[in-house]
Image (cartoon, rainbow, N blue to C red):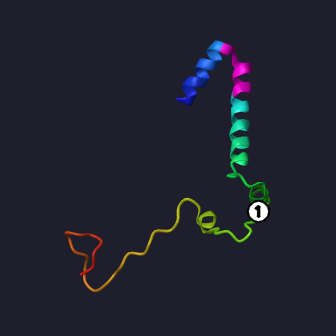
Amino acid sequence: MIGALVVLLVITMGAGATALVVVGGGVGYFVGKFLDGELDLEEVRARAQGRDQGRDTRAQEDGPYAPPAPVASGAGSPSRSTPLSVR
């Protein structure tokens, strides 16, 4: 949807004016987040410098691919009707 809007703007206004509109929209987005209090400049600076300031960094350490949860194991083989259950 946004891509189609950008193509339409390039066709009607030209590439230079479209680039100005897109950059202005990006700046306006971040200014709006800052004015609403959703953007903390100290947090952004700390993250850029690699400091976590006591926040939970487990998601950053594991990345998007956290190790899978362990599967319960017990005596015997798993049931055929429910492959993850243990008899």
Image spot of residue 29 (x, y percent): 68, 39
Left or right of 80? Residue 37 is: right
Part of the protein shown in magenta: 13-21
> Magenta region, mostly helix, strand or loop?
helix
Image spot of residue 53 (x, y percent): 74, 68
User: Residue shown at 78%/58% (left/top)?
Assistant: 42
Residue beneath disc 1? 50
Identify the residue at the far bottom of this view: 75
Residue type for callout 1: Gly
Number of numbered tags placed on the structure image:
1
Image spot of residue 51 (x, y percent): 76, 65
Give the image quarter of residue 25: top right
Q: Nearer the viewer, residue 75 or 14?
A: 14
Give the image quarter of residue 16: top right
User: Residue shown at 74%/55% (left/top)?
Assistant: 40
Identify the residue at the far top of this view: 12
Q: Secondary structure at mark 1?
A: loop
Image spot of residue 73 (x, y percent): 34, 81
Q: Is residue 14 above or below residue 46?
A: above
Left or right of 26? Residue 8 is: left
Q: Is residue 16 above or below residue 47?
A: above
Q: Is residue 24 magenta?
A: no
